[in-house]
Structures are given as structure tokens and as C-alpha cells.
Image (cartoon, rainbow, N blue to C red):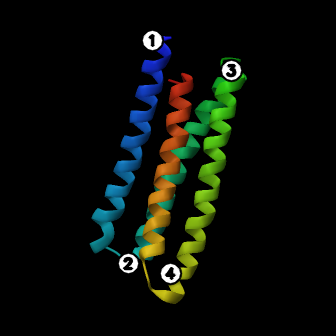
Amino acid sequence: MRNQALKELVGGLVAMLIGAALIAIVIACGGCASLETTAYRTIGGVSVTVDVAMTAWGDYVRAGKATPADEAKVKAAYEGYQRAMRAVHGAVRVYRVSRDGRGLQAALEAVASASGQVTGAVKQAGVP
């Protein structure tokens, strides 16, 4: 029981750190490129991070190590990530027309957080 609680805590911390790092990248790069360019770079980085995590997760599941509860958590996190990615792509299209970056910034923060949820759920399940 205590080991599981520690595993959940570590997984949550990893997810928060990844999300914070991605948000910091967005903020730091804000002055070095247009918001749209920064958004696409952020989307690209987030996509690679999630793809690596999901590839490792697939290997873990195929090895028969995942529990049904772990599978449900990772699936829910990944579905949330997919929704966030659709939202950020829509926000980029809106930004092109309106040039109001608030919605795009919020969508980028949401996709970074969703990415952290995926990687956290994968780590929490025990994937090395």
C-alpha cells in the first residue's frame, strides 16, 4: 500500500515537472518567434514526448505487465491529451484570424498539462 502511494506521488510529480517545463518553453520562446511558430514547436515537442511514452506503454502492455486499472488510467489520460491537441490546433486557426493569443496560450498550457498526465500515468503504472 505504501509503495503504491509512493509510486503515485512520483508519477504525479513527473507529470507536473514535464508540464511545467513545456509551459516554460512556451513562455521563454515567446520573444524569439511568433506565437504561432512557438505553438507548432511546442506541439511538436509534446507529440514526441507522448509518442515515446505510448510506445513504451505498448511494449509494457504486450509484455503482460499492465493491470486493467493501469490500462484504464493511461487510456483516459491519452484521450484527454487527444482532446487537448484538437483544441490547440483549433486555437491556432483562431489565432491566425484574430491575432488574440490568449486562447492559444491557454490551449498550449492545457496540451502541456495533458501530456504530463499521459507520461505520469505511464510512469505510475510502472513503465521504466
Foreground of the two, 69 or 41: 69
Residue neighbourhood size for the residue with mark 4, other residues' Cα within 10 Å, grouped as few (<14), some (14–19), many (≥20): some
Q: Amino acid at mark 2?
A: Ser
| Upstream in sequence: badge 2 or badge 3 | 2
Q: Residues within 10 Å of mark 3 (few under 14, many from 20)?
A: few
Circle 3/circle 1 CB separation < 8 Å = no
Task: Give the distance between the C-alpha atoms of the residues marked 3 and 1, in whole angstroms.
Answer: 18 Å
Residue 44, given in percent of the width and then of the height, sits at 50, 58
Image coordinates of residue 8 in percent, x first then y, are 47, 25
Query: In the drawing, does residue 54 fall left or right of residue 62?
Result: left
**Image quadrant assignment for residue 118:** top right
Distance CA(mark 1)–CA(mark 4): 47 Å
The secondary structure type at the circle numbered 3 is: loop
Q: Nearer the viewer, mark 4 or mark 2?
A: 4
State whether residue 59 is above or below residue 55: above
Label annotation for residue 34: 2
Nearest the camera: 2 or 83? 2
Mark 1 or 2 closer to N-term? 1
Mark closest to the chain's N terminus, 3 or 1: 1
Mark 2–mark 3 distance (CA, rounded to whole Å): 44 Å
Answer with left or right where residue 72 lies relative to residue 119: right
The numbered dot on residue 2 is 1
Q: From mark 1 to mark 2, how far is it between C-alphas?
A: 47 Å
- Amino acid type at mark 1: Arg
Q: Is residue 34 left or right of residue 88?
A: left
The residue identified by callout 4 is 95
Residue on which disc 3 sits: 67
Q: Earlier in the sequence, mark 1 or mark 4?
A: 1
